Image (cartoon, rainbow, N blue to C red):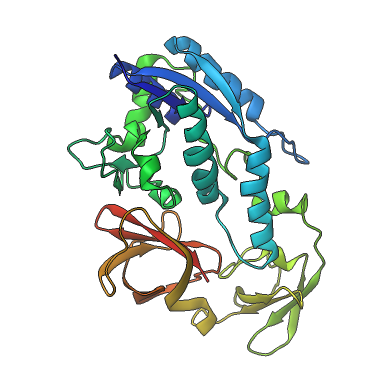
Amino acid sequence: MSQKVTVGMSGGVDSSVTAALLIEQGYDVTGVYMKNWTQDLPGMKCPWADDMADAKRVAVQLGIPFKVYDFQTEYRRLVVEYMIDEYSSGRTPNPDIMCNQEVKFKLFLQAALQDGADMIATGHYARIADRSQPAEASSAARLYIPEDKVKDQTYFLYRVTAEALTKTLFPLGIYKKEQVRKIAEKFGLATAHKKDSQGICFVGSVGIRDFLNEFVETTPGNIVDTETNAVVGRHDGAIFYTLGQRHGLEVGGGLPYYVVGKDMEKNEVYVSRNLNNDAMWRDFVELTNIHWIHEAPKDGESVAVRMRHRGKLLPAELRGTTLVMHEAERATTAGQSAVVYRGDEVLGGGIVV
């Protein structure tokens, strides 16, 4: 009897191809659209209805059952409120990481298993187990960088548990994006040429600033040159600025300014024209809310760390809860995630203090 796999279908090409490949491999596939966010924002209509229609259209093409799981209440509480609280505290969170941890690989997984599935699958570019079994889950359930290094999404997956990974398939881990498009064309999928989504997970192409504007009251304040203590401009809310930011300051004249800090209580943003300003560079960071998929790396073990999606893998070592990098990294910001790798394997990581 075929294993039953529930595929999270977002209405995009990646999850559509995921479903098609698993059917081809002999799995009993059901497609599910996760309805996490449906609220329109000024100037931006939430694309959920169109995305759900595209997902259903592909399910019909593939001849598989299609369902909708409604996680709107949980998504607002676990992802949106978390993001708003973090930004309001002056930190820079990653909502996609929290969405994976709390929604896709917890709520969705639990609901699918209760619904009779043996496993779930998503269109993430990542690999489970080893290169000899790229699309198979194993008892080890170790997470690896995919074949497509440009589309690599392991940064967003580091907080997923080993238990969840044992029940998960990532069929796209062995493919490049251009191959996935060709597979979609081969199957004649309705989403074959649909553009990839951008912006906040499930919300649409709205930017962080526009999103936060709807939920947080902000107050204008001073932009201060940290070298001279001179007020060089005004901002429309310290919450919108992050370390290393250059664009959006609207401080004219001379060399560009960069954000080197902010004080949420004083409602001040601090800037400098000096790229070598000490506040811009860190060669070690303290981590909190640390999560290891399996065992933690040994104290002092040589590892690699990625400080942001598509960021370079930087040589480092972990000493307790302190991540020591061999080279200073620019604009490492409180609230962002530091993801730790051993070769191609994702070990886990933590939140930068």
Residue at horizontal 32 percent and vertical 54 percent from the top: 294
Give the farthest residue toward the left. 132
Left or right of 80 on screen, residue 265: right
Left or right of 152 on screen, residue 241: right
Q: Nearer the viewer, residue 212 or 230?
A: 212
Q: Where, by quadrant of the figure, is residue 304 drawn?
A: bottom left
Give above or below for 11 relative to 249. Answer: above
Left or right of 309 on screen, residue 180: left
Q: Nearer the viewer, residue 299 or 13?
A: 299
Give above or below for 67 relative to 241. Answer: above
Q: Nearer the viewer, residue 133 or 242?
A: 133
Residue at horizontal 29 percent and vertical 47 percent from the top: 142
Does residue 8 appear in this view? no
Q: Where, by quadrant of the figure, is residue 217 drawn?
A: bottom right
Q: Quadrant of the N terminus?
A: top left
Q: Position of residue 232 (x, y in %)?
A: 74, 79
Q: Position of residue 139 (x, y in %)?
A: 26, 40
Q: Position of residue 279 (x, y in %)?
A: 54, 80
Residue at horizontal 65 percent and vertical 31 percent from the top: 47
Give above or below for 197 relative to 288. Answer: above
Residue at horizontal 68 percent and vertical 59 percent from the top: 85
Does residue 298 appear in this view? yes
Q: Position of residue 37 (x, y in %)?
A: 66, 36
